[in-house]
Structures are given as C-alpha cells and as structure tokens.
Amino acid sequence: MRKRVFGSIFLTALVTLLLTASLLLIAVHTGLSHDMRERLASECGYIATVIEGDGWQELGRIGRVYADRITLVGRDGAVLYDNESDVSTLQNHAARPEIAAALEKGVGESSRLSDTLAEQTYYYALRLENGMVLRVSSTADSALGALSAASPWIVLIVLMALLVAALLASWLTHVFLAPIVSLDLHAPLKNDAYDELSPLLHRMDKQNNKIAAQLSELKRRQAEFDDITARMDEGLVLFSAQGIILFANRAVCALFPEDSAVGSYMTLCRDPEYIRVVEDALAGKSAHGRMEKAGRVYSLSASSVAEEGQGHAAVLFVVDITARDQAERQRQEFTANVSHELKTPLTSIMGYAEIMENGIVRPEDIGRFAAKIRTEARRLLTLIEDIIRLSQLDEGGDPAPFEPVELNALCGTVCDRLQHKAAEHRVTLRVSGEHVAVSGQRHTLEQMVFNLADNAIAYNKPGGNVLLETGVQDGKPFVRVSDTGIGIAPADQPRVFERFYRVDKSHSKMTGGTGLGLSIVKHGAALHHAEISMQSALGAGTTITLRFPKA
Ligand code: ADP
C-alpha cells in the first residue's frame, strides 16, 4: 500500500509538473510569436511611411540600420530590393503567401520553419500606395530550437523536479498513512484517525466484540469439555478422517503412559485389536473389541462420524474392564466349582442309598452306611451354608448391625465350640491375651475366628497346640490364631484365601473342609476394614492375624 500511495502521488506530481512546464512553454512561445508579429507590423508600417514620404531610395539607408530583413517586391512579384541578399539571385516572390496576400488584400503575414526546424522566420508584408509590396521579416528560435538550446537546463530541471516530486511523494505518503498505520485495532473506537475511516472502525469494533464474545463462549465450552473428559474414568480419543489424533483425554494418557497421544492413531497403541477397531470406524463402521495390555483388560468401542466430503472421523472409548472381567471369570469358576463340590457328596449319598435299596447290604452294615450318608449330607449342608454366607458377604448384603464385640470372650466361645474337635485331633486349644472390643457383626466375627481356629486344628499334628490370642498393637485391636501344624508353602500362601483353593485336596476333604473357610475370613475382614497377615513355615506352623482399625 505504501508503495502504491507513493507511486500515485509521485506520478501525479510529475505529470502535473511536466504538463505545467509544457503549457508554460507553449504560452511563452505563443506570446513571443505574437510580440514578433506586432513588432514586424509596426516596423513595416514605419518604414512604409518613411519611403512613401521620402522616396524608396531611403530604403537603402534604413536597410543598413535595421537588423531585420527588408524586402521590396514589385507588383509582378519581382524583388526590387533586399537588404540581406543580392536581388538578382532571388526568385519571383509573387507566390509567397504573405506577398500574395498583401498584393490582394493590402496586408499579408506568414511564418516558416527552417529546414532543421530549429528556427522560425516571421514575415509581414504591406502594399504601398504605388502597388509595390514592402516586406519585413525576422528570424527567431522556434519552440523546438528554444527547447534544444535549453536542453541541459531542461534535463537539470527535470531531474530536480523528479527529486522534488519523490521527496514530496514520500513525505505525503508518510503523512497520509501515519494515522492508518498507527491504528489500534484492538480498540478501534479510541483511534483519532480520518473521519472517512469511522464507519470501518465502528464495524471493526462490532466485529471485535462479537469475536470476543464467541471466543469466550468457545473457551467456556472447551473448559467444560476438558473438565468432563478429564473426570472420565473411560479413555476418550477423537480421530480425524485422516486418522490423526485430535484429542485424547487424561484417562487415555494414564492408560497408555509410555505411548504418545499425538499424531497418527498408530502412535497410541500397536495392538492389532485396537488397530482393527479404529480402522473399522475410520472406514465408516462402528466397531467393538477387547484388548489386553500390561496385565489389564480393556474394552474398545469406536463410533464413526461422517465428515462431509472427507470420509469418516472416529470416536473411541477405552474402558478398563479388568475388574469386571476378573469378577466374571471368578463367577464362572465359582459356579463350576460349586457344581463340582455339590456333585461329589451327592454322588456318594446316591451310591450308598442305591446299595441299601438293592438290599445287598448286610443288616449289621446298615448303621455304618447310614452314618456315611449323614456325613456326606452334613458336608453338603456345611458347603451350602458357607456358599450362602460367602455370597451374603460378597454382595455386602448382610444387614446385621455393628455392635461392640469383645474379642477375647468371642475367642473363648469359639474355643468351647471346638474343644471336642481339638480333643479328637489331640491338639491343645487355648485362649490368651487382653480384653479388647471392636465394632462389628458378632456372628461374622465369630465365624471368622471359628474358621481360623478350625483350620488350625484340622491342619495340625497330633500333640500340637493352637493359641487364640487377642490384644492391641499400635492402637489397633487384633486376634491372632497360631498353630504348630503342617504350615503352608510360600507359593500357596497368597492363594489360600481364594474360593475353593486347597493346598491338599484329599486332606481338606478328610477334615471336612469346603475350601471356603479362608474366603469367608477374607470377606469378613473387608467388611470390618481389618487387615489380614499370615506367617507360615512348612512343618512349623501357621499364624494368621486380623488387625482391626483403631477404635
Ligand atoms: P478348607 O475348608 O479346605 O480348610 P480353607 O479356605 O479354610 O478351606 O483353607 C484353604 C486351604 O488352606 C486349606 O485347604 C489348607 O490347605 C490351607 N490351610 C488353611 N489354614 C491352614 C493352617 N492353619 N495350616 C495349614 N494349612 C492351612
């Protein structure tokens, strides 16, 4: 713009300057021509008066004095006198325009350019009373001649004009553009620029306000979106139709900390299932999948969003379903285990019943068979009770209220209940420690201690000991059940709390175990926010401690 303004001003100044100079030249030249004609006319009149009064012989004297050329032509056009040329060399002048006009009308004038066009000769002719014609002529530089004579000056003047025009244009450009260049576009109405710019500045101000309002609305929405997506546990990724990651929320970055959520969809994850799901969505099909990564399971769900003329963008949800998956697997395992556990005693009962039904049992053996049926039925009942108890604890569905429970007395009760079994196993069962109360469900706590003590007797050795101990450590109430039994191998220790997990299946069954005792302890501990710790050594015994929260 600056160049265009400068160019326009410069050109205008230059054209104006040159035009003015040309017109001036023409005016001066026209004025000079006019003066010249006037002068010649008055000179001619004067000389005519002299020679008509004093005779044309006077012409010789006048001709010598005058600088201009004086010619006397006869009525027939023959040159009779000329103060600059030899008359005999001159042709007949009758055809010369000024002579012809004077002969005809009394006065004639003309002007002729020299061959080089550099000079112009002016002629003025006057018919005398005797019919002859007196002509006075003078030569001056023509306009072109005057121009070429002054050409060095003209070049100098043109150069100066160019310089002045350039300086003037530059200064005017600066002055003209300064208010525009210094416009504050952030606050258009505060500008003190040209009045003509006022509508534009008002418009700009309006647009600025509109843009600011739209921007703040966009920012608000963006913040809202960011807030929502940041709080989401699910991973959310948006892909452009070209498969470029446009957005990935915090959950995705946490799910794939070692991968980059920038650039192509391939940079986020290389799992074939992930790639299939994203590619399907980019191809316009909604897709679902499942992916395992770093020991966790994710469900992938991608939707396709059609973009006009550009293919399909995609939205991907990544949900960590490890816990759900595990729970589902556990439920399936549990169902299979329960069916199996129920089937074994029932098959035994069916077997004994069939033998008795067929009458192939000797009468003295009937009592023994009935006892076996009762044992298996008892097992079934225990198993079903444990399953019910476990599912109650699992669902957190036992509505029994929490109450203060004194642990040492509770151990005493359990000890009483198991004294008979301990005697059968030739194991000494004792209770020791201080009185300490916790808040909890009495029957759940009793079952937990019972299961621990029951195991401590069942997996003991004849002559062994079981100690139920209560107390407070670091402000936390505890119950500790320790035995001098067979112990648990380190590899089995973390697994004994799983449902139906038994270190030695036949031993467990022999002792009437269901494989659910420690599972119930684990769930009961979770209900009471208690921690379980286990120390065990093969052949030396096991100690399991339940630590309750500080009162
Ligand atoms: P079970 O009904 O078979 O006893 P539990 O869930 O109570 O089931 O225990 C799981 C397994 O842990 C048992 O089968 C047993 O192998 C082992 N176990 C539990 N307590 C002890 C213990 N005090 N000493 C040795 N092994 C134990």
Image (tube, rainbow, N blue to C red):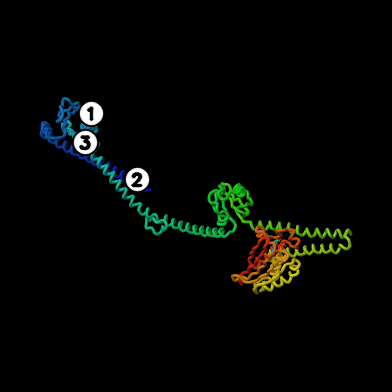
- Tell which tag, 3 or 1, sits nearer the viewer: 3
* Quadrant of residue 65 within the rendered picture: top left
Residue linked to disc 1: 95
The disc label shown at residue 7, or none = 2
Front-most of residues 187 and 149: 187
Residue type at tag 3: Asp
Front-most of residues 412 and 529: 412
Element marked by disc 1? loop
* Quadrant of residue 356 within the rendered picture: bottom right
Residue linked to disc 3: 141
The location of residue 276, given as percent across then percent down, is: 62, 48
The location of residue 263, given as percent across then percent down, is: 53, 49
Q: Residues within 10 Å of mark 3 (few under 14, many from 20)?
A: some
The answer to whether residue 532 is above or below residue 319 is below
Name the outermost residue toward the top. 88
First in sequence, mark 2 or 1: give its number: 2
